[in-house]
């Protein structure tokens, strides 16, 4: 253990020197491999808090995929059905619980997870390490590693892959500080616990929130607790499927996250599952091709010779009408917001992505408009009376 650790550099290469240090006691993590950077540790420590809280709230192993101090994906170990195994390219594989959580977290938004930092609530096993070894990733934090998992990870990125081991017993003080432009800020840490109790106030006509939906709402809210605000999260089947972070307008968060949730649904469509990929296509190129194929700029792939780079034959166009019809089948999606919805337009957009359950703080002068919009679509909404801003 050590009190201080020199870093490669700060947020940018010109920001040297850089270090992390403890005013009291030792650093709560051990570097098992590699050399950490400033943003690596921001991702690691935020991600660790997120997965620890997901595990506490659900009782299931949890994983998160972080990029630039916001999660690209977060999930708990809910078993994958056969279709989702195809979507996540793990057909025919019996997954361990922690590997299941990681596969879900990474698979939610593979484009955003490119070059991520992984957080696990439980020990990293060899299967999870093997999956991670083939992905483009900057590092991982977990409470422990099996001997085989550690050996696998130490070989990644020519031996430079960052592996951090977190002290599970570490409990920080109640106050936290930071400096901005030479000015020190101090506040109480956000220690509020996200539990089912915060879903009790349901002002909508539909008050029915099944157990699975409660779980998904808790996942959305805990994910938002560690997402740069403003933020909105769509969740389903034990994982985040669309995260909108750092937007100045709440409806822009809802749209951004909704588009990501729509993409997640579109990846389940038969046209996408049947894409004829070449055997030599790299994983990032495959993921990018899927993203373009289901997007509005599909011509860039299919109306040029670029399709030959990734496909054995030219696939049919996935038309806008076909995509709209497929997304219209979505239902049972949970949505969380880190603060109140000021207008019903957020509900209108959420409905288009199959949202059936919502958790938001409430407290807007237009709460009645938001409730009415939910009632229009039979959405069950809980007002948590908890704001989850994170900066």
Image: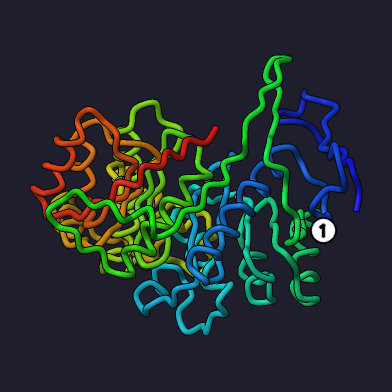
Relative to residue 43, is residue 335 drawn left or right?
left
Q: Position of residue 267 (x, y in %)?
A: 33, 61
**Which residue shows up at 71% across the image and 20% down it?**
184
Locate residue 378: give its quadrant. Answer: bottom left
Q: Position of residue 52 (x, y in %)?
A: 60, 59
Locate residue 365: give its quadrant. Answer: top left
Locate residue 218: give its quadrant. Answer: bottom left
Q: Give the structural element (helix, strand or loop) at label 1.
A: helix
Question: On screen, 183 above or below 48?
Answer: above
Is the N terminus in the top left, top right, bottom left or bottom right quadrant?
A: bottom right
Question: On screen, 50 above or below 229?
Answer: below
In the image, 30 versus 212, the foreground residue is: 212
Question: On screen, 375 above or below 208?
Answer: above
Q: Position of residue 2 (x, y in %)?
A: 91, 48
**Which residue shows up at 67% across the image and 65% down it?**
133
**Which residue shows up at 34% across the image and 41% down it?**
361
For disc 1, the marked residue is 159
In the image, 245 versus 322, the foreground residue is: 245
**Which residue shows up at 24% across the image and 51% down it?**
381
């Amino acid at each position: 253990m050590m009190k201080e650790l020199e870093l490669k550099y700060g947020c940018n290469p010109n920001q040297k020197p850089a270090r992390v240090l403890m005013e009291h006691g030792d650093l709560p993590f051990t570097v098992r491999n590699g050399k950490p950077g400033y943003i690596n540790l921001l991702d690691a420590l935020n991600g660790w808090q997120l997965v620890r809280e997901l595990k506490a709230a659900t009782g299931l192993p949890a994983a998160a995929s972080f990029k630039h101090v916001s999660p690209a994906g977060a999930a708990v170990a809910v078993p994958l059905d056969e279709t989702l195994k195809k979507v996540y390219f793990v057909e025919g594989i019996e997954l361990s619980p922690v590997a299941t959580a990681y596969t879900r977290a990474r698979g939610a938004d593979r484009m955003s997870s490119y070059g991520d930092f992984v957080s696990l609530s439980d020990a990293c096993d060899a299967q999870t390490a093997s999956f991670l070894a083939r992905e483009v990733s900057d590092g991982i934090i977990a409470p422990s590693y099996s001997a085989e998992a550690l050996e696998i990870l130490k070989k990644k990125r020519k031996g430079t892959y960052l592996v951090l081991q977190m002290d599970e017993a570490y409990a920080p003080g109640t106050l936290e500080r930071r400096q901005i432009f030479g000015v020190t800020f101090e506040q109480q840490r956000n220690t509020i616990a996200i539990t089912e109790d915060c879903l009790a106030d349901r002002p909508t006509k539909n008050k029915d929130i099944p157990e699975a939906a409660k779980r998904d709402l808790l996942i959305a809210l805990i994910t938002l607790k560690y997402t740069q605000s403003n933020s909105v999260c769509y969740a389903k089947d034990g994982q985040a499927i669309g995260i909108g972070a750092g937007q100045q307008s709440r409806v822009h968060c809802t749209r951004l996250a909704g588009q990501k949730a729509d993409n997640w649904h579109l990846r389940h469509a038969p046209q996408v599952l049947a894409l004829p990929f070449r055997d030599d296509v790299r994983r990032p190129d495959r993921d990018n091709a899927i993203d373009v194929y289901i997007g509005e700029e599909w011509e860039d792939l299919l109306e040029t010779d670029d399709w030959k780079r990734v496909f054995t034959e030219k696939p049919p166009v996935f038309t806008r009408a076909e995509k709209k019809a497929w997304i219209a089948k979505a239902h049972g999606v949970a949505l969380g917001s880190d603060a109140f919805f000021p207008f019903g337009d957020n509900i209108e957009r959420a409905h288009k992505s199959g949202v059936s359950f919502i958790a938001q703080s409430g407290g807007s002068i237009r709460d009645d408009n938001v409730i009415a919009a939910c009632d229009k679509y039979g959405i069950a909404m809980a007002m948590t009376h908890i704001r989850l801003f994170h900066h």
